[in-house]
């Protein structure tokens, strides 16, 4: 029998997050050498990744960082997915998210691909995630990474379940004047999920498709031909009010729009990003 103690088993479990049986097998194989057992578990964890590839990772968390830099502030937002909410609140998963975010910030990553190519402790983020997936026993995916730069960057993180980490995250980029309302706007975005900042940001093909659908719907409802242009414009305007940030009714005061709230500061909001886990 290999030379190791109950304390060695516990230490290895805490170090790797692996199960009792896996830890004992690794210690047996490593003849009681804890460092060698860690390597054995890592290898087995990496092998296990292929078995997890086909499984769905739709739980997890969002996490953000805001730092001073450049012409103001830089915000980074990540979405890290797991298969179950049980793992999403696991301390090792939370620590993994912190490490991945730090690596993304250091690498100035603005996409998941760029973040995965960054490094943690001499390994790529992709390798580091794979190793942790092995110890956590679930498929772990860095789904999205975004970067916002502006004179002021505000964040809002929302927990849809008090027992889980944040599952909705928003970053808003603004100038200093509009920075006074940037967090309120971030909260609004979390609740009302606009797709675009202004009407000018909506792709032309999207607008054209909305016009087509509005016209076909109106015809199907038997509306008079002469009334179609006005009806179509009204429905396209409704689309803008629902999907563009500045046209939405402000969450804190539905009698005004987000655009008016920004306008009253004398400043402007330049960008935003919103992640919802699994959406």
Image: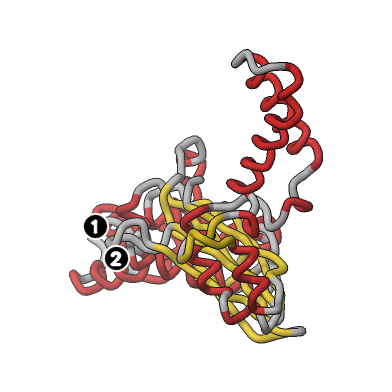
* Image location (x, y in percent) of residue 131: 49, 58
Q: Quadrant of the N terminus?
A: bottom left
Q: Which residue is drawn at 60% across and 72% down?
A: 103
| Image-quadrant location for residue 94 | bottom left
Point out the residue furthest to the left here.
Answer: 6
Residue where numbered disc 1 is placed: 20
Indicate which disc, 2 or 1, sits on the residue closer to the N terminus: 2
Label 2–label 1 contact, CB within 8 A: yes
* Label 1: element kind: helix
* Image location (x, y in percent) of residue 260: 63, 66
Q: Is residue 58 above or below residue 258?
A: above
Depth check: give the residue in front, 267 or 124. 267
Q: Residues within 10 Å of mark 1 (few under 14, many from 20)?
A: few
Q: Taking 156 as reference, is 164 left or right?
A: left
Q: Taking 13 as reference, is 200 left or right?
A: right
| Label drawn at residue 13 | 2
* Image location (x, y in percent) of residue 193: 54, 52
């Amino acid at each position: 029998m290999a030379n190791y103690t109950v304390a060695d088993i516990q230490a290895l479990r805490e170090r790797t997050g692996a199960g009792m049986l896996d830890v004992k097998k690794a210690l047996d194989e490593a003849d009681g050498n804890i460092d060698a057992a860690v390597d054995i578990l890592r290898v087995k964890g990496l092998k296990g990744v292929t078995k997890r590839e086909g499984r769905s990772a739709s739980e997890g968390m969002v996490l953000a960082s805001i730092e001073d830099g450049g012409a103001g502030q830089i915000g980074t937002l990540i979405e890290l997915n797991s298969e179950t909410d049980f793992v999403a609140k696991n301390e090792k998963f939370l620590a993994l998210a912190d490490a991945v975010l730090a690596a993304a910030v250091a690498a100035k990553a603005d996409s998941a691909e760029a973040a995965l190519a960054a490094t943690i402790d001499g390994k790529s983020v992709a390798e580091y995630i794979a190793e942790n997936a092995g110890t956590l026993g679930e498929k772990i995916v860095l789904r999205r990474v975004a970067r916002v730069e502006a004179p002021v960057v505000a964040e809002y993180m929302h927990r849809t379940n008090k027992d889980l980490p944040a599952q909705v995250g928003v970053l808003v980029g603004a100038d200093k004047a509009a920075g006074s309302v940037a967090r309120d706007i971030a909260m609004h975005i979390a609740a009302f999920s606009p797709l675009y900042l202004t009407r000018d940001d909506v792709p032309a093909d999207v607008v054209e498709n909305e016009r087509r659908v509005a016209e076909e719907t109106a015809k199907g409802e038997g509306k008079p031909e002469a009334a179609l242009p006005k009806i179509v414009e009204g429905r396209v305007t409704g689309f803008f009010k629902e999907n563009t940030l500045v046209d939405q009714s402000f969450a804190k005061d539905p009698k005004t729009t987000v655009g008016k709230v920004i306008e009253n500061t004398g400043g402007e909001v330049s960008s935003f990003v919103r992640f919802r886990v699994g959406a």
